Image (cartoon, helix red, strand yellow):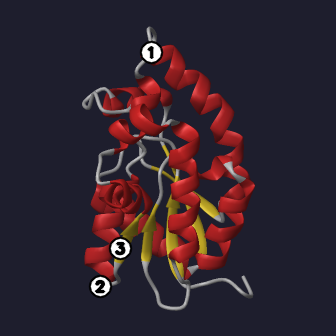
Amino acid sequence: MTGRGRAIVLIGFMGSGKSSTGRALARKTGWPRFDTDESVSKRFGRDIAEIFSAFGEEKFRDAETEALRELSGVAPSIIVTGGGIVLRPENVELLRRLGTLVHLEADEETLFQRVSRRTTRPLLQTEDPRGTLAKLLREREPIYREAADFKVDTSRLTHEEVAEAVLRSMESL
């Protein structure tokens, strides 16, 4: 872990609980929380769905990488990422410099139930959202596993329980 920052970096598929767990971790640790989706949204002055619609996924991913470059791993912090941030190897390297990567995962059914609560997921605006989710999950799971220092299954846990599990795992590193 030499050369790594002191942040807890949450990665994982949409609906895995990164945002809620990030807020819980920030409350428990007192550390500042940075959310790459919030940074990108603020930069464009639009929500994520509008950014995808107006500028496309590539422009969103460029802004996501730029948001990572602006973060520093010097002080302890909680970093919440978008589900696709690991698609660029450069982003994974930037995240590793910031700190410990925690893969929040959940089973496909749980993920679908969670993401179905909101209609603002741009990548699921398809004829078959369930099929699209399954395909994206199959493509991304190996990338999350490879990038992560450890994982926590959020399928049956509250956000507070996930935060506690992350902190326990951090202590054993």
Tell me the quadrant of the picture where the N terminus can be found: bottom right
Residue 44: quarter of image: bottom left
**Residue 65: % across, % down:** 58, 60
Q: Give the number of the mark in front: 1 or 2.
A: 1
Other residues around mark 3 within 10 Å, as few (<14) / some (14–19) / many (≥20): many
Camera-near label (3 vs 2) is 3
Task: Please rate how many residues cluster around mark 1, counting C-alpha atoms within 10 Å: few if below 14, some from 14 to 19, many from 20.
Answer: few
According to the picture, the residue beneath numbered tag 1 turns out to be 126
Amino acid type of the residue that numbered disc 2 sits on in the rendered structure: Gly
Which quadrant of the view contains residue 78?
Answer: bottom left
Q: Secondary structure at mark 2?
A: loop
Question: How many numbered marks does the figure carry?
Answer: 3
| Circle 3: element type | strand
Labels 1 & 3 near each other (Cβ < 8 A): no
Residue 103 seen by the camera: no
Residue position marked by numbered label 3 in the rendering: 33
Vertical side of 89 occupied by 97: above or below? below
Residue at the image position 67 percent from the left and 83 percent from the top: 4
Residue receiving disc 2 = 30
Q: Position of residue 112 (x, y in %)?
A: 39, 27
Mark 1 or 3, which is nearer the eye?
1
